[in-house]
Every structure is written in C-alpha cells, then in structure tokens.
Amino acid sequence: MISEHAEWLLEQFLSGKKTYFRGLHSQSETEPDIKSVLSSDVLYMTSHFGYALAYTLDVPKFTFSDFSIIESKIEITNSNLSKMIDRNKHYWIFPIKIDKMGDIFSGWSVRDQRILYELMFEKTDFSNKHPNVKGIGNVKLERISEFLAKHDWLFAESDSETMLGLKRSDLIELLSSPQSAYDGYWNYDMEKFSAIGIFKKSLEKMSAGKPLRIWIVTKGESEFLEIGYAKPYMSN
C-alpha cells in the first residue's frame, strides 16, 4: 500500500497519533475531495477501519469487525458481499487526523453532564427556546446523558419522554454554540462500534489525506477487496 501518496499515512502511524476514517461512495470515478462529505452539520468519522469500510460499502456493520486497522487486501470469496456491493458505484475512504482538538462531549462523563446543564440554563437561551426542559433536575439530566451514551444520536428523539422532546438537531445547536468549548461529540452506534461527530465550526482543526480507493478484484476463482492508491491488476 505504501506509495508516493502514502507518506501522510506513514507519518501518522509512526507518530502514534490516532487516525480516523470516513468513507464515501459515488457514481463518478473521479477522485473525490473531502468537501464532498461536508454538507451536513456534523462530520462523522471513526478510528475503526472495518466499521468505516462497512459504512462505505453499505453492508452490515459487523462485516469487517476484525479489521480495526487498515488492511490492503480482504478476501470476500464465497461470501454474500459480492451480491451486496453495488458494482456501479466507486468507493473511497479518507484517512483523517485531528490537530489540537478540544472537548468531545460524552454522555458518560459527569463533567460533561454538568457543562450540559450550564449550557442549557446559564450560558445560552436554550431553556427559553425549549421550555419543556425548565425545572430539569439532576435525575432527569442523568437519564438524558445516559440515553446519549447508549444510543445513536440520529435516533435521540425516539424516546421523547426521556429526552423531554429534544431532538438531535437541538443538542447539536447547543453543543456547537459559541458559548460551548466542544468540537464534537462521541456517538454510540452498537456494541463496540462508535464514531465521533465533528461540528462544522471545528473542521479547520482536522486534515484529510489522499483518499484510499477500494477496488473489487477477481483473480481466478477468488475475489478480493483491494484498498490503496495504486490500481491493482484485475483478471476480469
């Protein structure tokens, strides 16, 4: 996988810094820019390579659970993946590094619970916009934080009673406000898989390397995913 474009990755690994991954797919074969995935209010990324790979290929999350770090070749012979992967799309994974990142909100943190309370009632006019949170006590706040620690934030409003009617967009607006020191939040998905969501205001603190291309390669009767910068030989 090491090539003229891989020095960025090599420096990242040798330095011991954590590398995050964000994948995307496209109908176009043109190499994408990281700006292609910056259209939403949050940029999600994960340090688990296999999780990012499954997300990119739109296959079950546990498909590549054993691959926590970058792999250059993964055999998929005699698996259902051949039928699941859309061959009409092109796939990439961006390696990302974060420099001087500030706080990442976690529902497990007692400190973050306290700061969340301050943001709701002392530092912003959030409680005026959401009168249903007025009078919230420590018990209810702990329940909200526990929910955020154990659930994907995309479904925050699924438990309206626990969340006091708050939606994901409400929380992101609060945590990304000028009064907040948070650059993002920790987002649980399922079991050992999680990601961090970086707010738009903090994207200048991260940089993305050249995207790794994912090819589906057939060699004889075997089939592989080959991941890297150089196009592999394809027998058919």
Image (cartoon, rainbow, N blue to C red):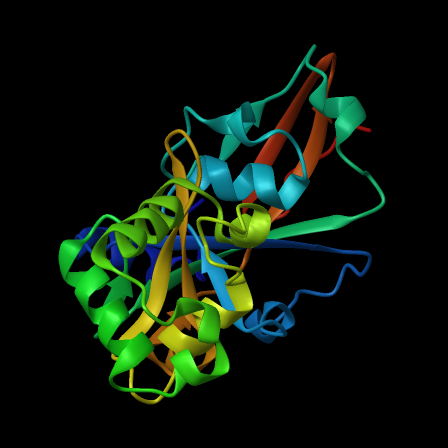
In this view, the residue in front, 155 or 201, is: 155
Q: Residue furthest front?
A: 135
Q: Is residue 114 left or right of residue 59?
A: left
Which quadrant holds residue 95? bottom left
- Identify the residue at horizontal 82%, vertical 57% (top origin): 27
Residue 133 visible = yes
- Identify the residue at horizontal 56%, vertical 53% (top origin): 157
**What x and y, as percent, mark residue 135?**
32, 68
Q: Is the N terminus in the top left, top right, bottom left or bottom right quadrant?
A: top left
Which quadrant holds residue 147? top left
Which quadrant holds residue 53? top right
In this view, the residue in front, 204 or 236, is: 204
**What x and y, as percent, mark residue 28?**
80, 61
Position of 144 relative to 233 (above/below): below
- Identify the residue at horizontal 73%, vertical 33% (top origin): 234
Q: Is the C terminus in the top left, top right, bottom left or bottom right quadrant?
A: top right
Q: Residue furthest right?
A: 88
- Identify the residue at horizontal 50%, vertical 71% (top origin): 170
Residue 102 visible = no
**What x and y, as percent, mark residue 48?**
39, 41
Q: Residue furthest left?
A: 111
**What x and y, as percent, mark residue 105?**
29, 62
